Image (cartoon, helix red, strand yellow):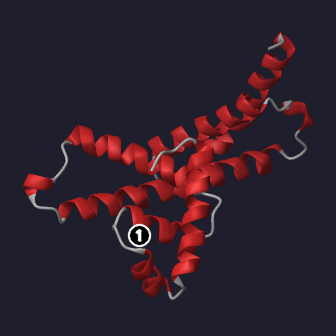
């Protein structure tokens, strides 16, 4: 990366970091999460290789990236919470170890990321099949769709998982 680009990024960071951190902190009300989100926002800017001088409205640009990251963070937390609540229902003898729980949560996050662009009903059908072990007929009854439609949903979800490298 050329020195001029690096210095532009440094100036951009120093000009907007404090504002972004306050902006994100107001939304999250949690300083560590706000710091992580602000840092992730600038990392995404770096990864995109965007020339900071070309950004006409830097705060709107950073705010959009941060909003998406906050949404992702909240969705991951809800997913984790739902999974942990389900684990609490298992008999102690069947409960996974802390290491297994960590690996399972990582797998859930990977699946969640891979399904992110799909309609909610497709995600629900996939999760009912994979996590709850329901048949297509049972899923169809719960979602009020035909078994054939459930099959199409599963094909969509599995294709997304395959394309993103997630193995179900």
The image shows residue 136 at horizontal and vertical percentages of 44, 75
Q: Is residue 162 above or below residue 132?
A: above
Q: Secondary structure at mark 1?
A: helix
The image shows residue 8 at horizontal and vertical percentages of 83, 23
Q: Left or right of 98: which side holds 44?
A: right
Q: Nearer the viewer, residue 132 or 150?
A: 150
Q: Nearer the viewer, residue 72 or 63?
A: 72
Q: Nearer the viewer, residue 30 or 86?
A: 86
Q: Left or right of 155: which side holds 111?
A: left
The image shows residue 33 at horizontal and vertical percentages of 48, 45
* Image quadrant occupied by the N terminus: top right
Let me know if residue 67 appears in the view.
yes
* Residue at the image point whose x is 68% and y is 36% from the top: 44
* Residue at the image point whose x is 41% and y is 59% from the top: 79
Question: Looking at this rendering, what residue extends furthest in the top direction?
Answer: 3
Q: Is residue 26 above or below residue 39?
A: below
Let me know if residue 120 appears in the view.
no
Q: Left or right of 65: which side holds 104?
A: left
Q: Which residue is mark 1?
A: 128
- The quadrant in which residue 5 appears is top right
* Residue at the image point whose x is 16% and y is 62% from the top: 90
* Residue at the image point whose x is 36% and y is 62% from the top: 131
- The quadrant in which residue 139 appears is bottom left
Question: Looking at this rendering, what residue extends furthest in the left direction?
Answer: 93
- The quadrant in which residue 117 appears is bottom right
Question: Looking at this rendering, what residue extends furthest in the front direction?
Answer: 148
């Amino acid at each position: 990366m050329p020195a001029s680009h690096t210095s532009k990024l440094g100036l951009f960071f120093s000009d907007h970091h404090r504002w972004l951190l306050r902006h994100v902190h107001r939304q999250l009300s949690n300083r560590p999460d706000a710091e992580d989100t602000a840092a992730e926002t600038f990392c995404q800017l770096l990864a995109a290789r965007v020339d900071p001088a070309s950004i006409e409205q830097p705060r709107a640009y950073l705010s959009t990236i941060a909003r998406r990251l906050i949404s992702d963070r909240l969705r991951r937390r809800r997913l984790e919470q739902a999974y942990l609540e389900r684990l609490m229902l298992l008999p102690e003898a069947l409960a996974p170890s802390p290491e297994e729980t960590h690996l399972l949560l990582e797998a859930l996050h990977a699946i969640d990321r891979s399904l992110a662009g799909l309609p909610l009903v497709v995600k629900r059908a996939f999760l009912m099949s994979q996590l709850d072990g329901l048949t297509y007929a049972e899923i169809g009854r719960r979602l009020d769709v035909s078994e054939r439609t459930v099959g199409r949903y599963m094909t969509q979800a599995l294709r997304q998982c395959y394309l993103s490298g997630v193995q179900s």
